[in-house]
Image (tube, rainbow, N blue to C red):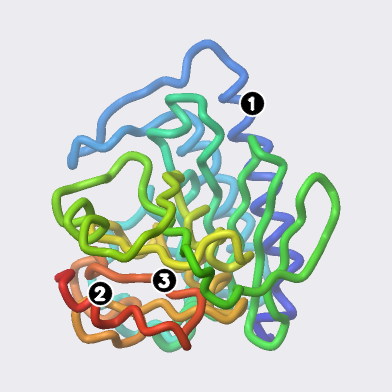
Amino acid sequence: MKPADLLQPVLDIAIEAGNRIMEVYASADFGVTQKGDASPLTLADLAAHEYIAASLAALPVGYPVLSEEAADIPFETRRAWSHYWLVDPLDGTKEFIKRNGDFTVNIALVVDGYPLLGVVHAPALDLSYFAAEAAGAWCIRAGKREAIRTRPAAAVPAFVVSRSHKDATLEAFLAAAPPHEAVSRGSSLKFCQVAEGTADLYPRTGPTSEWDTAAGQCVAEQAGAEVLRLPGFARLRYNQKDSLLNPLFAVIGDPARNWKTLLSRVG
């Protein structure tokens, strides 16, 4: 099946996973624990993971699933995958715990190292972004569906940056940048702001894992953006090594705007 043929079923899965997340969100106890890397884990992460993994496995394509909550799969196994699902059941767990709404369900289909289908669903915001090769990029906001595209870079560009993962490298980058507006968001919504033309650049100087970025990358790229690793400016790619950590990267909404001189200072 083509990625576009799977887009609606995967969107439906993400929305239902979001419903299960919101059931926990409405409760008094999130069941917060810590994983080995000291990142938080909640009952919502686990509920979404279990539903998504079972639902993707039931699709007629039979692709393997790599989820943040079931990532202990050796590279010797993964490297043979030409197609697989890459999932973050609850991206922005810190934002979930803070109850600020900036958390998402991320589901991507990675084909030969690149995400060709991506769904980013923000259940607390009643907001979904989704895209696939040959299908374009779309948004459903409060029940209204519309196509999205990046914009030509504004005269005073808007940079979107991490709400919970700012660091000295990012601060130095922003200090060296021309006049701009800097907006903080959580989770993969930063990709989506570039995709829908409400931000021009997303520089990522802090650590991310592959499940954090693949769905958002697909949405951004299908909307006209570039997602480039730093340094070097090669397209961000997946499942190429044992580690599932990403390099630094940037999401550029208007490829005609030359950000590369500025971005070359990162990395």
Cα–Cα gap, marks 1 and 3:
33 Å
Q: Residue at x 31, y 33 (%)?
A: 40
Q: Residue at x 61, y 66 (%)?
A: 197
Cα–Cα gap, marks 2 and 1:
41 Å
Checking the image for residue 263, the label placed there is 2
Q: Secondary structure at mark 2?
A: helix
The kind of residue tagged 2 is Leu
Q: Residues within 10 Å of mark 1 (few under 14, many from 20)?
A: few
Q: Quadrant of residue 12?
A: bottom right
> Outermost residue, right direction?
144
Q: Is residue 258 visible?
A: yes
Q: Position of residue 152 (x, y in %)?
A: 57, 77
Instruction: Judge from the rendering whether residue 34 lies leftward or rightward of residue 99; answer left or right.
Output: left
* Front in this rendered view, residue 92 or 191: 191
Per the image, the residue denoted by label 3 is 251
The kind of residue tagged 1 is Glu
Quadrant containing the C terminus in the rendered view: bottom left
Instruction: Judge from the rendering whether residue 107 lies leftward or rightward of residue 161; answer left or right.
Output: right
Instruction: Judge from the rendering whether residue 206 lies leftward or rightward of residue 51; answer left or right.
Output: left
Q: Secondary structure at mark 1?
A: helix
Q: Position of residue 232 (x, y in %)?
A: 21, 86
The answer to whether marks 1 and 3 mark residues whose Cβ atoms lie closer than 8 Å is no
Cα–Cα gap, marks 3 and 2:
11 Å
Q: Is residue 109 visible?
A: no
Checking the image for residue 23, the label placed there is 1
